[in-house]
Image (tube, rainbow, N blue to C red):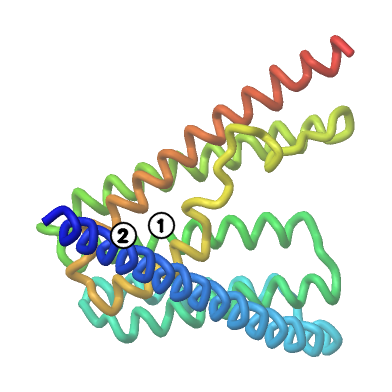
């Protein structure tokens, strides 16, 4: 009897190990595919941006044009025309990648950086609003929570940027090196993937909005903690040396 139990236990252990290996291999394959796809897209937009930059096309005008198309997504979402909304979102993100490539191969300006960031924030907020309009009864509360969290994260980042820019001539502040900053969460790529999924399966809006909202709030808190570390603790340590 004991031998049978040991045999079953060993079989379960082997089976569990095999399943873990399969999951790890699948995860590595997906990550590898995403990295290759990103590299190809980056190369494509970089080449296109180089050509556009040489032709004199302004990165700022590309930003504005992409933003205008993206804003039409609000109208399509309100009418529950999710396919057209997704098309507007994809075009907007493509133009967002293109304007950066053009700027890299022509001239990066402070106004261009500001315009790109400002239009991105307005676009994302507008799309959330569009989902609320699509189904106010089911989506309004989740959309409101996501907008609150999104605004909290954005304001924290922008406030940090203001102080960092102000102190740039005096102290170099390393934002990403702070032990409190969780820079990898609630970024543009994750938000973009979430919007694509929501346009395909709009009934998932509430759970996805809540997850994104929680991640955004965590990021806002991490930025505040990172700001205290960089603006208070790190400066005190430098003065004591």
Q: CA distance from mark 2 to mark 1?
A: 6 Å
Q: Which SS class for mark 2?
A: helix
Left-right relation of 2 to 31: left
Say above or below: 145 vs 98: above
Report the residue at 27% width, 48% height from top.
Answer: 144
**Contact (Cβ within 8 Å) of mark 2 with mark 1:** yes
x 44%, y 62%: residue: 191
Locate the C terminus and report the quarter of the image it occupies.
top right
Q: Is residue 202 left or right of residue 106?
A: left
- Which x, y percent locates residue 192? 45, 68
Residue at position x 76%, y 77% in the image: 102
Q: What residue does disc 2 label? A: 129
Quarter of the image with the N terminus in it: bottom left
Left or right: 34 with respect to 231? left
Q: Which mark is residue 125?
A: 1
Which residue: 35% across, 44% down? 214
């Amino acid at each position: 009897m004991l031998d049978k139990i040991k045999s079953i236990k060993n079989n379960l252990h082997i089976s569990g190990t095999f399943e873990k290996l399969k999951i790890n291999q699948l995860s590595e394959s997906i990550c590898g595919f995403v990295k290759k796809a990103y590299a190809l897209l980056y190369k494509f937009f970089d080449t296109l941006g180089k050509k556009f930059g040489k032709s004199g096309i302004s990165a700022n005008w590309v930003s504005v044009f992409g933003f205008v198309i993206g804003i039409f997504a609000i109208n399509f979402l309100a009418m529950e025309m999710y396919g057209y909304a997704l098309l507007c979102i994809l075009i907007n993100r493509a133009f967002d990648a293109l304007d950066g490539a053009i700027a890299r191969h022509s001239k990066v300006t402070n106004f261009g950086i500001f315009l790109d960031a400002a239009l991105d924030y307005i676009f994302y907020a507008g799309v959330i609003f569009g989902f609320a309009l699509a189904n106010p009864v089911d989506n309004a509360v989740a959309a409101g929570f996501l907008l609150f969290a999104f605004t909290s994260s954005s304001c924290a980042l922008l406030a940090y940027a203001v102080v960092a820019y102000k102190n740039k001539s005096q102290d170099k502040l390393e934002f990403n090196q702070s032990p409190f900053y969780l820079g990898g969460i609630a970024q543009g790529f994750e938000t973009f993937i979430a919007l694509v999924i929501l346009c395909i399966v709009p009934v998932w809006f509430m759970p996805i909005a809540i997850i994104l909202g929680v991640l955004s709030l965590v990021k806002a808190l991490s930025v505040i903690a990172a700001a205290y570390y960089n603006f208070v603790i790190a400066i005190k340590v430098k003065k004591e040396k």
